[in-house]
Each structure stands twice: as structure tokens, then as C-alpha cells.
Amino acid sequence: MIEIKNIKKGFGNKTVINDVSAVFKTGKCNLIIGTSGSGKTVLMKCLVGLFEPDSGEIIYDGQSFSDMNEENRKNLRQSIGMLFQGSALFDSMTVEQNVMFPLDMFTKSSYTEKLKRVNEVLDRVNLKDANNKFPAEISGGMKKRVGIARAIVLNPKYLFCDEPNSGLDPQTSLLIDKLIKEITIEYNITTVVNTHDMNSVMEVGDHIMYMYQGVKEWEGSNKEIIFSKNKLLNDFIFASEFLRDAKDMRMLEVRGKIDNNRDMDELMK
Amino acid sequence: MKFFTEFGLYLLTLKGMFSRPENGKMYWKEFMHQCSDIGIGSLGIVAIISVFMGAVSTLQTAYQLVSPLIPVSTIAQIVRDTVILEFSPTLVCIVLAGVVGSKIASELGNMRVSEQIDALEIMGINTKSYLIMPKLMASIFMIPMLVVISMVLSIIGGRLAGTATGILSTAAFDKGLHQYFKPYNVFFALAKSYTFAFIISSIPAFYGYNVQGGALEIGRASTKAVVVSCVLVLFADYLLSALLL
């Protein structure tokens, strides 16, 4: 579990995150959503220690990250996996070398053991026969999967994903979302996902936090989001007419005003 | 003011490199990789420059020594001292500032922009130590070797040019090479090359590591790194000459 208390972060005179508190539970997909510039990425970078918050506390399973010295932070970071927006794979290394890199750096296992583990995780993310390919030779979706494989190869306790669906088609996005969800449950890890993608919100959002101009505006689950009366959240989630219609339809279904099992072909006539 | 900020940041970057390696074997691997990149990778250009540098030095020295009172072997002596004292350490390092410096700055800049450095940080790796230290150590190890190779090749180039054009015989050139040779000059050249090696690896590493933005900024950082390195090499050249000669 990760707990953040009254996090504040600014750059110069501009406050980017203002007094944000939240709890990200273990075994759940915790989503941070919000418009561009709402402070999601900065918050995530504060969580993983790439930015130092101006004030507030970040607590990883009872251990305050803010109070840790560099050595303890290093140790904690070995239990953190992160998937970056652009995958951040090492260009000069093959897929296999990318995934093996954390094992090379932090374990004393033999090459055979490391290779076995690499193949295990590549298999887990449904990526076979790509071991010897370079990042430049694989598709965006494959890069994301390699990124996930690299993030989970050391059996992390915490997984952070920054915009895992950016630049992907809807089908591949769904696959990545499902993969993140499955891994979260299978490894019982605390997953925090930063996203704009509404499909992700509805598919995997066990716990959703909506940020607006650096402030936590709304919090709840994907079941609750549809019924939220928060105007800012509704404007963000149901930005398109299509989604607004879909929401109205869903509300009518839930209230029993229209038949859930209606024959769409019949209606189209 | 900006100069002091940058200088402070440069010192902090260098200070950040000194920490216990997470895995010595991986650091060694990276060091060897950089040695190959910086040393072997630059050998071709260094060889070409050196041979021509020596050849041109011979021809131009001969052109200027018109007095019949000065023996022709003096040409070789002048070429030897010019090459050892100035041309090989300074000129080669200026060229390497372009070749190695831009490579280091753009490689680190690209890693920064594409979040590869962030990925390493999150894994718990001291990126300053893992990415900059091996480059710095490899430069300090390989560049003096390249300078020594350059000295030898320049003298060979000068000897070839001298005999090919009939300015002086190989015997006269070899005689000149031995005349009044001071081993201290080689020490001075090596002292310069160690200093220049530090400059041409640490400055580009600093600019590359701290890039913010995109491809345009990587290009700018790379250019700035080469320009600043070249100016500092020339400044250090003057300073060392004033102090050590």
C-alpha cells in the first residue's frame, strides 16, 4: 500500500500539485486521471522519487519515503517497477538484454537462471521470438510489453505505469490494460497508472483519482464514476457527444427505463 | 550569474559520480565498452590526422629553414618537438572533442529525453556513476594512448613526406630525431593529454546528462559541449604551458 499525505510540489512560482492526499491499495489498479497539465506525471515522479515534493509525505507500506536516506531509497527502488510513456527501452540493447538488465545489475544468478527468468516474463507478456530484436525493430505495443516485462522481472511490490496506452490503437490498448490488471492480481502488487484513456478507466480502474489543476477533485471506483455529479469530472470523462449519449443510455438501463437486453437490430429499423 | 550556476551544477554532477557501484562487473563491462567506443572508434581519424599533420609539418618547416648554415636534420628535430609538445596532444584532443564529445553529449542527451536515465534511476542505479564515470575513466585511459600513437604516426608521416619529396634523407631525419631529445617533453605532452581527456569527456557528459526538451535541445547541447570543450582545451593548453615549461 502506498499512502500520500498533503503532497505539494511547485516549480518556481507555479504550484503544480497542491495538497494531494490518497491511498493506493495493494492488489488494485489505482488510476490517476486528469487533463494534460493537471499534475499527474509530476505526482507520479514524486511517488517514485524522481522529484522531491516541497512538502508532504509518501509512505510505502509504513516506511516514509521522505525520511529515507539515499541507501534505503535505493533498496526500496529495487522493489519498484515502472513502465514509461515512451517505454524507455535501452536503444543499444536487444529485448532480451533490456529485460535482463535489472537481473544483471542486482542479482548474482547465473546466465542460465537469468535467461530462464527473462523468458518467463516475456512469455507472461505474450512476447515470444523477440529476444534478439532491438527496440527500433518492434512495434509500439511490443515495446510497451517489453517495458512491462522489464518492470516485473525483479518481482516488484509496486508497479507504476505512465500513460501505458499513449500512441496505441484501441485493441492493443485493451490488451495492455488487461495485462496490467492481470499482473497486479497475479503478483499482488500495488499498481498506479497514469492515464487519459477512458477505456482504461472503465476496464481496469479499481480506484480512480481525478486531478484538476494540481488538486484532487474526485476519488472513487469505475462503478461510481458513471454516476458522479462532479461537473469537472463529467466534462473530462464524457467530453464527446458519443460518450455523453452512452452515459445517458447506461443511466436509463440502470434505472430500468430501457431494456438492458433490447434488440439493437430491431431498434435500428 | 548563469556561468556560476552552470559551474556549480557541473561540480555537483561530478560529485554525484562518486558512490559505491551497485555491481562492479556491470561497471567494468560499461568501462570496456566505452574504451572500445572512444579508443578504437577514434583510432582511424587520429591516424589520418596524425600522418598528414607530420607530413605537412616537415614540408612547412623545410620551406621556412632556408639558411644553408642550418643542417637539414634540424627539420626532423623541429617536427619532433612541435608534434610532441603541441600538435599531437592539442590538435588531436580538439578533434576528439568533436568526435568523442558530441557522441557523449548526444548519447546521454538522447537517454535523458527518452526517459532511459529516469528508468535507470527508478531501478535504484546511480546514473551519474553508471553512465558518466565509465566514459570519463575510459577517456582518461584511452586518450593519452591515442596521443602517443598520434606522436609516432606524425613522425612517421613527416619522415615519409621528407624522403618522398627529397627534402631530407631518412638517415638525416633519424639523426634529427635523436638530436637534443628531452624526455620531459613527452611527460608534458602526457600531462596535457590527461587534462584534455578529462575536459573532453566531463563537459559533454555534463551537457548531455542535463538536457531538457527534445531533439533540438540534444543538438544544441552537443554543439555547446564541443565549443566549450574546445575553448577549455585551449585555455588549459596555455595554462599548462605557462606552468610546466
Image: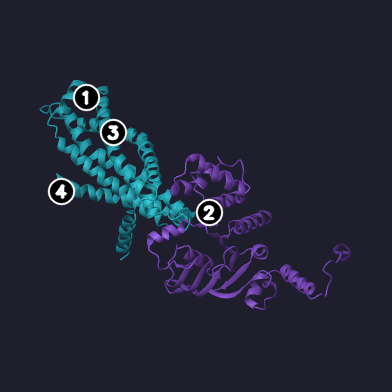
Chain colours: A purple, B cyan
The answer to whether marks 1 and 2 sit on the same chain is no
Mark 3 is on which residue type?
Ile
Check disc 4 and report the residue beneath it: B243
Q: Nearer the viewer, residue A51 or B236?
A: A51
| Quarter of the rendering containing residue B11 | bottom left
Check disc 1 and report the residue beneath it: B167
The answer to whether marks 1 and 4 sit on the same chain is yes
Going from the N terminus, do you reach mark 1 or mark 3 first? 3
Q: As drawn, which residue projects farthest toward the left?
A: B69
CB atoms of marks 2 and 4 within 8 Å? no
Decide if residue B28 is on the left or right side of residue A265: left
Going from the N terminus, do you reach mark 1 or mark 4 first? 1
Gap between marks 1 and 4, in whole Å?
Answer: 36 Å
Decide if residue A262 is on the left or right side of residue A188: right
Q: Nearer the viewer, residue A180 or B134?
A: A180
Within-10-Å neighbours for mark 1: few <14, some 14–19, many 20+: some
Check disc 3 and report the residue beneath it: B149
| Quarter of the rendering containing residue A131 | top right
Gap between marks 2 and 3, in whole Å?
Answer: 49 Å
CB atoms of marks 2 and 3 within 8 Å? no
